Amino acid sequence: MFQLKDIWTFLWSFLIVFPTVSLVHQLGHAFFARIFGGTSNFALGRGKCLVKFGGISIHSIYFLDSFCKYTSLKYNNRFTNTLVHLGGVIFNFGSILLINISIMQDIIGPDIFFYQYSYFSLYFAAFSLLPVNFGNGKFSDGYAAYRIMRYGEELQLEN
């Protein structure tokens, strides 16, 4: 049962953990875009830009949304485009695996942050993989990867 004392855990999750998950997800897209010869920019949040460094901008409502854009890839084929679109999910799952291995090896201790991070990462990745057409040429990561693999379409990432 949710109680008043749980407000702090909710705020911690909402304002710190979930944006961290979103950041790792966007870093995955950016990583794969860059290793295949593209450039990328991504933003955490919506609203007024608070901080911008390199291709990363953080906005006033940083916990609400995130998105990544990338330029054409130097190594441009179905495989590389699919990896760019699935890069966020790969980073989310990879970070969960890294956290669990680190806890099992006693490198880090079990903590509520890691539990919540893993939970939200799994949630974020699962919903990113759902094949959804949002309209106006915007697709979920899973749907974009499907269209690239099935039809060979070259889709620019902006999710």
Image (spheres, rainbow, N blue to C red):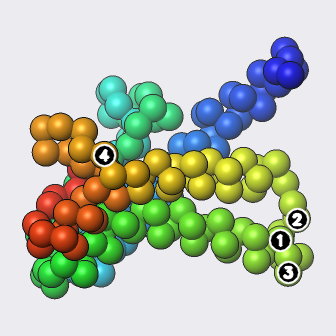
Q: Give the residue at x 16% y 58%.
A: 156
Q: Earlier in the sequence, mark 3 or mark 4?
A: 3
Amino acid type assigned to the residue bearing label 4 in the image = Val
The amino acid pointed to by label 2 is Gly
Q: Quadrant of residue 80?
A: bottom left
Would you call the spot at circle 3 few (<14 residues within 10 Å), some (14-19), or many (20 or more)? few
Q: Answer whether residue 70 is visible to the viewer in this image.
A: no
Task: Read off the residue under disc 2.
Answer: 109
Residue 36 shows in the view: yes
**Cα distance between the residues tagged 1 and 2:** 6 Å
How far apart marks 1 and 3 lie (CA) works out to: 5 Å
Q: What residue did someone put label 4 on? A: 132
Where residue 15 appears, as percent x and y from the top left, is 61, 34
Which amino acid type is marked by label 3?
Gln
Marks 3/4: CA–CA distance: 38 Å
Crowding around mark 2 (Cα neighbors within 10 Å: few <14, some 14 to 19, many 20+) is few
Measured as percent of width and height from the top left, residue 95 is found at 61, 67
Q: Sequence order check: which comes first, mark 1 or mark 4?
A: 1
Residue 64's place in the image compared with 152, above or below, is: above
Q: Secondary structure at mark 1?
A: helix
Alpha carbon separation for disc pair 2 and 3: 9 Å
Query: What x and y, as percent, mark residue 137?
Result: 13, 45
- Residue bearing the label numbered 1: 103
According to the picture, the residue beneath numbered tag 3 turns out to be 105
Q: Residue furthest top?
A: 4
Q: Residue 4: x percent and y percent? A: 84, 15
Q: Quadrant of residue 96?
A: bottom right
Q: Are marks 1 and 3 in contact (CB under 8 Å)?
A: yes
Give the amino acid at mark 1: Ile
